[in-house]
Amino acid sequence: MRPLDPDKREKILNSVFVLTGKQGLASVTVSGISKTAGIATGTLYIYFKNKEEIVQLAYAAVEDKMTQAMYRDFDINIPIKQSLKQIYINMLNYRLKNYDETVFIDQYQQSGYIQLNFSKQLAEYEKQNKPLYDLLQKGQQEGIIKALDAIILISFFDGAVRSCSTGIIQKLFPLSQQLLDDCFDMIWRGMS
């Protein structure tokens, strides 16, 4: 048996993002994925057991990429506000440059798929986002960040970044340095 082609696997996963961006996660089908990927449905089943497995692995792949992007140039030793703003800018940039992936992530997190392996996914999320958890804990110890559970603070932060990116993409307001600064200032005031 010859080895599986990683490019085909990537095409399949990317097809999930494209279809979700166009029609929503609930409307994604195996036949739609294979058609968008340009491969036969039978070939798709060589790579994945079913749609659920494709969706789960697509989520894991995007989470990995997004997390790596979030912590680019991160330094916990600089002032907390500056560190948090770096994460904010990185996250916002990723969302603006990878629209289909972020639509997929958002819809996945609001669907029943997240419940399939919730405990495992939450543990992985906490591990991947340890820099943010550590930053928030440091901020709380210094009395700079509100003494709330980290997941509440992270949910607030993530929701604010998501809303800002959606507004920019939908052209509700133009992207500018002033907008970036104002949005981050609102986040900072909400968390500090």
Image (cartoon, rainbow, N blue to C red):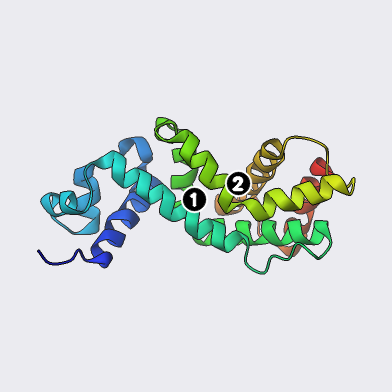
> Please, what secondary structure does the residue beneath circle 1 have?
helix
Density class for disc 1 (Cα within 10 Å; few <14, some 14-19, many ≥20) is many
Residue at x-position 34% and y-position 44%:
55
Tag 2: amino acid: Arg
Density class for disc 2 (Cα within 10 Å; few <14, some 14-19, many ≥20) is some
Whichever of labels 2 and 1 marks the residue nearer the N terminus, that label is 1
Please give left or right for residue 167 compared with residue 33 in the image.
Answer: right
Q: Is residue 160 above or below residue 135?
A: above
Image coordinates of residue 87 in percent, x first then y, are: 68, 58
Find disc 2 in the rendering and name its residue: 162
For the residue pair 139 and 100, the one nearer the viewer reads as 139
Tag 1: amino acid: Thr
Total number of numbered discs in the rendering: 2
Find disc 1 in the rendering and name its residue: 102
**Residue 123's disc number:** none
> Please, what secondary structure does the residue beneath circle 2 have?
helix
Answer yes or no: is residue 28 visible. Answer: no
Residue at x-position 55% and y-position 57%:
67
Residue at x-position 14% and y-position 54%:
43
